[in-house]
Amino acid sequence: MSIAVTFLVNGECHTVAVEPFDTLVDVLRDKVRLTGTKKGCGVGDCGACTVLLDGKPVNSCLVLALDAADASITTIEGIAKDGELSAVQKAFISEGGTQCGYCTPGMILSATALLERKPDPTSDEIKDALAGNLCRCTGYSGIMRSVSRCSNYQSDGTCAKPSHPLPKRDKSESDYRPSSGECGSVGVSIPRVDAGDKVTGRAIYTNDIALPNTVYGKILGSPIAHGYVKKVDTSKAEALPGVLAVLTGKDVPDTMYGVSPARYDEYVLARDKVRHVGDEVAAVVAVDERTAEAALELIDVEYEELPAVLDPYEAASEGAPLLHERYKRNINTHVDQSFGDVEAGFAESYLIREETFTGNHIYQSPLEPHATIATWEHDGTLVLYTSTQVPHYVQYMMAHVLHIPLGKIRVIRPTVGGGFGGKAETTPLDLCAAIFSKKLGRPVKMVYSREEMFHHGRGRHKQHMKFKIGVDREGVIQSFASEIYLDGGAYSSFGVATAYYAGSVLPTLYRFPNYAYDGYRMMTNKPAAGAMRGHGVPQPRFAFECLLTMVADDLGIDPIEIRRRNAMTPNTMTVNEMDVGSCEFLRTLEAVNEKVDWNEKYGKLEKGKGIGIGCGGFVSGAGYCIYRGQVQLSHEKGREPFQKKSTFPHANAIVKISEDGMAAVLMIGAAEIGQGSDTVLTQMCAESLGIPSSRMRIRSEDSDISPLDLGAYSSRVTLMAGHAVSRAGVAIVEKLLPYAALLLDCDPGIIEAHNGRMFVRGDESRCVAWEEVARKYFNDNGPLVGTGAYKPPDGLGGDHKGSSVGTSPAYSFGSAVCEVSVDLETGKVAIDKFTDFHDCGTPINPMAVHGQVEGAVVMGASETILEDVQFDDKGRILNPNLHGYLMMTIKDAPEIFSGLVDSYEPRGPFGAKEIGEGSTLPVLGAVAHAIANATGVWIKDLPITPEKILRALQEKRDSPETTLADAKA
Amino acid sequence: MYMPSVEFHQATTLPEAFDLLQACGPSTRVLAGGTDLLVDLKAKRVTTDHVISITRVGELKGIALDNGSLRIGALTTITQLDESPLLEGGFDPIRDAARLMAVRQIRNVATIGGNLASAVPCADLPPILIAMNARVHIASRDGEREVPIKEFLLDVRKTALDRHDILSAITVPQPPPQFGAAYERFGLREGNAIAVAAVAAGIRLATDGTLETATIVLSAVSPIPKIALQASSIVQGQHPSDDLFARAGEAARGEADPISDIRGSASFRRDLVAVLVQRALKKAVERAGGDVL
Ligand SMILES: Cc1cc2nc3c(=O)[nH]c(=O)nc-3n(C[C@H](O)[C@H](O)[C@H](O)COP(=O)(O)OP(=O)(O)OC[C@H]3O[C@@H](n4cnc5c(N)ncnc54)[C@H](O)[C@@H]3O)c2cc1C
Ligand code: FES
Ligand code: FES
């Protein structure tokens, strides 16, 4: 029974009909239609739903709307006054306080409430005020900068002159060149192009879209880890008032799907078997989400339970339960690679060390849950709004499963609240929503709950690693051999590539003369593991970094020195035939060394304090597309053989100039997911057009508007899409040159376009306005459009099996130093400080680069010491929520210094390479080393929890002689 | 995750609340800040047909000093508790717990009454309130009764509240001279993490500097906060010293009754107890003006 309730929302009176069970967040979003208030968990753990209730921040998901009757509520939409942003909002724009933006409304409200209470907060007070707002993107650094900037806050939302001067940036930070947004585009830290929308609540995420006549779907997950589905009785669910349709395995196409074409092994809904807790069994669509959720409980499924296997070694053993008939002994992928002569390398080594390391189950946990809306047009076109990082692969997979041409599918990617790899594949939500929508002729919206996200999985593979290294007397690597068991979960997902990545990127950082890698991706009865930031590499990189440091200690060599001696050099073909071009790894090492005063600290710190080094690097875009052959025409196309070249351009762009020449619209399908691609692509395009970036608009969200781009994965966007947009810009300029030549009365060959003007090279006074030339072009010819495309170079990689994985036009490099304090009585670790230097080529937007590094440092540190998806012995997740799965809050995050070294990559646009994933790689090893340095014990299985530290310290006390040598010990 | 269907009632006075409690069924729940109840309802840990909001009941609000003892209305939020000038001085240790609890958004609505009535093993306020000899006031149609917190908390999620009762206030007696208390807890992360183990200590120094009385309360390591009797008696009559406190910690390690879960094993929790006992005792003695050798 609904009751009419009045609230004062942002100063306006709203009377809405409210049900007793409605929480404030749902009323604000669905009934008042203010969607700036976000939902990330529904149970008070994330702070995305923060609003001010009578001036105080509260989680609106934990307030009953009826209980808040007559209250005054401020949402993010009420912070700007008459279109004028508040000081906090402005600071979030200028200081990089927002990335994906999903946490931003809540952050800004918490910060605003703090500043109203305390106009000049200390940094501890800021942290305390924001500790309830999780952010997965920024590492909280940009947020700290933003709020600190607002000191001396006035109640009208402005700031008087700062009472204490802003911290001075030292020289290596000088690349934070503020810009008026008017001129020079590449290399300038312009604010994100979408920041204004994100700080005001105007950014529209998939779940914010309410198409008329929408109905809502939900998916039922299996309660058991392994079993046959004997019978599904949906009659009771169908009888529930409000339920419109139910789907089970027999109602969905008999087509398997997945990521790697060689291993499509998932059905939309289980047809015969379930393979993990949460495996999708049936789906319901109803008039509202609540009814759909209730209907799930009315579906009776009869299972014949099978024994489950949860450990990859057990999965490989004789007689273990088999998940899929096709994967004998549960081996999903076996990698067997050997380069050089590994045994000879060991034979020549002065020191050989073998160690075993274990990773953890990490889940990306973007703040925005996956969401989809499907609707069919009358001409049979499927329109899919989806929170994805790979619109094209979703389109491709929908075509494959639904048996319709790609051209009949329009994928719209609204604002995405973070991905990190967790949104890099087609979900059952996409598929079920499309099937339901077709059936009902209505838009269908489906959203995962936080718990369902964990059950859907696709997080980092937990890896079990046996590493063996041989070095000479000077610590130079002679041979390296690894055996890795990857815990793949129940389906392939990205796993084939993951298994190869786990081996292929290690030799791009240090020179390995001889190298063998034996990898097994095993099927287990857990949610499928997928691709996560640093795809397959962070855990082996962690293990390798630890091992290298152990070896350095064994030999009495400084850990930075041993890295110097083995560091990758520019223009080197690695032993596994990865073609490294630019490489300033050594410079990053020297830069951190100097910046942290390494020599003054290493081995000289007091008890409980530690310092550690870690390095890493990554590909700047996968050299090959995930599927083979040319763009698929239909699902019937057979599998094609691998060709050592790109068979179609991976990134494509169109630029259209407005008829008056004043605006350029860039159309590209590259997925902005918070990492900032819209901004850097805008900058590169503007640069090549020769106009200020403020004249550009980017349309990257709609496959009907933008040509194909493979999406945001493998850190490919800056390099690949960057080339495409630059080429599209150049194409326009080329069209303009003859007209400019006419107007300037000179040879077209000597004309340049820059900052909105076209002029004679060497004599800028002979110039004409860019827009005038563009207008002339239009008047004579019609539309002024340019296109650009990028294909990775042909012939990347060797000829061995799996040689394509790890290939890339370019590689990034980085070195990081972590400083920690460890409470030796409780084992608790405080990550105090991080210093990172990266070679990302030429930074297109330094602020965006630092934002990626800061985010990666906190994410990486968090996964090293806190995060782990835990399972019980029945394969049930024990912590599928954000109070059990712990990610760092602002109080846990270290102070971060992010620096860049000079570098230029000839294969990148404007000399640029990647930063998004490579920035994660040094982190885990640096943290692990710092903890070892502080405690004298190495913890080789992640996460490095206080309990593990305490146990190791106790063991060391009990038997001092068996512990490992450490600089401290 | 949605709220189940419930009937919602709002009381504005205590008598109204009692009437509603009488009229609705036995599974009825009282709603204060809702930070436990709504989560429990959404997670289906709790089921009920009726929710009675007491958030507008004036009689349950406010903090006051009465003859030196502190009366804290059940609806007092954690933020109000933390910010109240009345806590300055002797009642300061309560702030140790209030500040460590949850995060601002939660503290702004979560109430002291809810923290006690929920009776979850890791709740932050009960241990320090026990160490400070607080008492719980329970109101019903028949008037108000008063019990020490120890007797209020019966088991996990079980209290002395009858289904017609409302927890109305907590009173904390004026700390005697030379009294000091402290709360130390261990959480896995700095922000928004519940206690894996926690210890509250309340001590009183004799004029010769020895510990005249000591109450050591262990929390999150037993179904309800547990007074570590052995540990407490070890320190009684002794001069405070690190060594003494270490022995108390060792005794408390054995007295704890922890479980293993995703946050840590039972033995890890015991280790934490041993450390936290020392830290809490030390801080309590310092607050009492004593010296630790
Ligand atoms: C994200 C998050 C973090 C948290 N962190 C912490 C933490 O660090 N430490 C901690 O201790 N707790 C924590 N909690 C739990 C919770 O916030 C506290 O226990 C809080 O004090 C509960 O108070 P409330 O007013 O919200 O209770 P409610 O949820 O309203 O009520 C809780 C229970 O008590 C009953 N009740 C409430 N008031 C009365 C009354 N006056 N008379 C009779 N019965 C009553 C209700 O019926 C219900 O059963 C956290 C909760 C969340 C969601
Ligand atoms: S949605 Fe409310 S705190 Fe996460
Ligand atoms: S910007 Fe904070 S979660 Fe993405």
Image (cartoon, coloured by chain):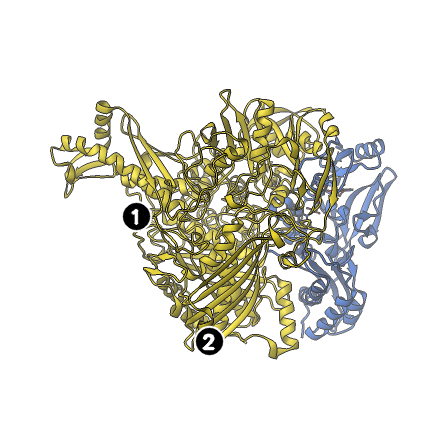
Chain colours: A yellow, B blue
For this rendering, which residue is in front, B54 or A930? A930
Query: As shown in the figure, which amino acid type bears the numbered disc 2?
Result: Ala
- Locate residue A748, reporting x and y percent: 15, 36
Q: How many marks?
A: 2
Give the SS element for disc 2: helix
Quadrant (top left, top right, bottom left, bottom right) of the N terminus of chain A: top right
User: The residue marked by circle 2 belongs to what chain?
Assistant: A
Say which residue label 1 marks. Answer: A910
Q: Would residue B132 be seen by someone viewing this image from the given angle?
A: yes
From this viewpoint, which residue is outermost toward the right? B142
Q: Locate residue A628: give its quadrant.
A: top left
User: The residue marked by circle 1 belongs to what chain?
Assistant: A
Question: Mark 2 to mark 1: distance in Å?
Answer: 45 Å
Query: As shown in the figure, which amino acid type bears the numbered disc 1?
Result: Phe
Q: Can you tell which of label 2 and label 1 is closer to the viewer?
A: 2
Q: As displayed, is residue A780 above or below residue B210? A: above
Say which residue label 2 marks. Answer: A347
